[in-house]
Image (cartoon, rainbow, N blue to C red):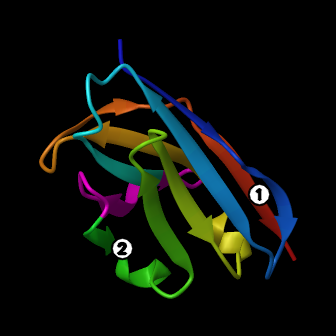
Amino acid sequence: QVQLVESGGGSVQAGDSLTLSCKVSGFTSSNYWLAWFRQRPGAEREGLATIDIDGSTSYLLESIKGRFTISKDGAKNIGYLQMNNLQPDDTAMYYCSAGTEYEFKYYGQGTQVTVSL
């Protein structure tokens, strides 16, 4: 049974940084893509970043480039989303997801990030 558990969210002030972690279990190997999504209050879920099987290639939503970084530790089966210079507009529930390049089938329960001025 595949499980994803996010951690690292919290309440911070504008300009602060957070690193979200996503512990993945249940895959027979580390051959999965990892992605991060977020859902702002009253909005649809938004894809932020993806990283491939060996962590060599990543994609970031244009609006977060330069502030957010996605990474993955295949040996530990942990994914990360480093978020710098957080702004109130980044307030959302953040989710990690795992799957193939074309289908992210498994999701965690999410971790809340709240950014205040």
* Residue at 24% over, 57% down: 52
* Mark 1 or mark 2, earlier in chain: 2
Q: Position of residue 94 (x, y in %)?
A: 56, 49
In the picture, the quarter occupied by the N terminus is top left
Q: Nearer the viewer, residue 87 or 83?
A: 83
Q: Furthest residue to the left?
A: 102
Residue 58 percent across, percent down from the top left: 30, 69
Task: Report which quarter residue 47 is drawn in.
Answer: bottom left
* Magenta run includes residue 94: no
Residue topped by disc 1: 114
- Quick check: 34 left or right of 117? left
Q: Which residues are magenta?
A: 38-55
Q: Kindly state the secondary structure of the residue where label 2 is placed.
A: strand
> Which quarter of the rendered picture does the C terminus lie within?
bottom right
Q: Is residue 85 left or right of residue 101?
A: right
Q: Which residue is mark 2?
A: 60
- Secondary structure under the numbered disc 1 in the rendered image: strand
Mark in the foreground, 1 or 2 = 2
Q: Is residue 7 left or right of residue 11?
A: left
Mark 1, Cα crowd under 10 Å, few <14 / some 14-19 / many 20+, is some
> In whole angstroms, how far apart are the C-alphas of marks 1 and 2?
21 Å
Does 42 appear in magenta?
A: yes
**Residue 108 at what x, y percent from top left?**
49, 31
